[in-house]
Amino acid sequence: MIAPIEPAALVLDTPRLSLRPWADEDEDLCVALLCDPQVMRFVGETLTEAQARAHMPNARRRGAGGRLGIWCVQDRATGEKIGDGVLTPIPIETEEPDWAQLVPDTYPEAAIEVGYLLKPGAWGQGFATEICARLLRFAFEQTALAQVVACTDPDNSASQHVLRKCGLRDCGPARAYASDVAWFEMTRAEWQAQASNQ
């Protein structure tokens, strides 16, 4: 049995951003992200509005006492919702995570992925790096995870740059989301060594 985390501990701030667990009122952001061909270019099929809205129950799921799931990312200066950040089970030969693994009192069997999506207006400002770094810190300070993984489309050099900048190791080509991907990993020991050098 995993003790639930205090809700306030799930609100994660960075110098410019605030991350909070996904909620019902974030359906507009879900549609804005998943229905935008620019956002979905390296992620998967652009969804219809109905498909994006149908994703909401999964977007609200939390696992491991609330520690795993999807966060809404807001610009602290304006309050605008600019994207999301995730710590979710990574699928290998399916296109969608096994959302049923996100249950309150246990950790998923699958490896946990750090990820992020941003509206195009928020690109190129370093926000993805802030999101990734903050979620890695949370993962290794507030969960029992021994490692966190990430993947990108092999051609998504911008996202690969973010992952390397945050200290994840480039592990070469692999499979995830039923596709060929570039695979990255970070262990707890690697994160601790990096954190002690900052």
Image: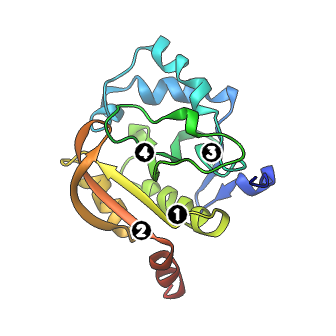
Real-space Cα separation, disc 4 to disc 1, in angstroms: 15 Å
Question: Are discs 1 and 2 less than 8 Å apart at CB?
Answer: yes
Residue 186, numbered label:
2
Labels 3 and 4: the sequence-earlier one: 3
Q: Is residue 18 above or below residue 121?
A: below
Type of amino acid at the residue the image marks with label 3: Thr
Identify residue type, mark 4: Ile
Q: Quadrant of residue 53?
A: top right
Q: Are marks 2 and 3 in contact (CB under 8 Å)?
A: no
- Along the polypeptide, which appears first: circle 1 or circle 2? 1
Residue bearing mark 1: 136
Front tag of 3 and 4: 4
Front of the two marks 2 and 3: 2
Q: Is residue 67 left or right of residue 83?
A: right
Q: Residue furthest top?
A: 50
Disc 3 packing (10 Å; few <14; some 14–19; many ≥20): few
- Residue 34 place in picture, x, y as percent: 43, 27
State how far apart marks 3 and 1 are (Cα).
25 Å
The residue pinned by badge 3 equals 78
Q: Earlier in the sequence, mark 2 or mark 4?
A: 4
Q: In the rendered image, is residue 117 in sight?
A: yes
What's the amino acid at mark 2?
Answer: Met
| Pointers 3 and 1 in contact (C-beta within 8 Å) | no
Callout in the foreground (4, 1): 4
Q: CA distance from mark 2 to mark 4?
A: 14 Å
Helix, strand or loop at mark 4: loop
Q: Residues within 10 Å of mark 1 (few under 14, many from 20)?
A: many
Residue 130 rendering spot, x and y as whole percentages: 50, 60
Residues at marks 3 and 4 touching, judged by CB atoms closer than 8 Å: no
Find residue 90 and name its label.
Answer: 4
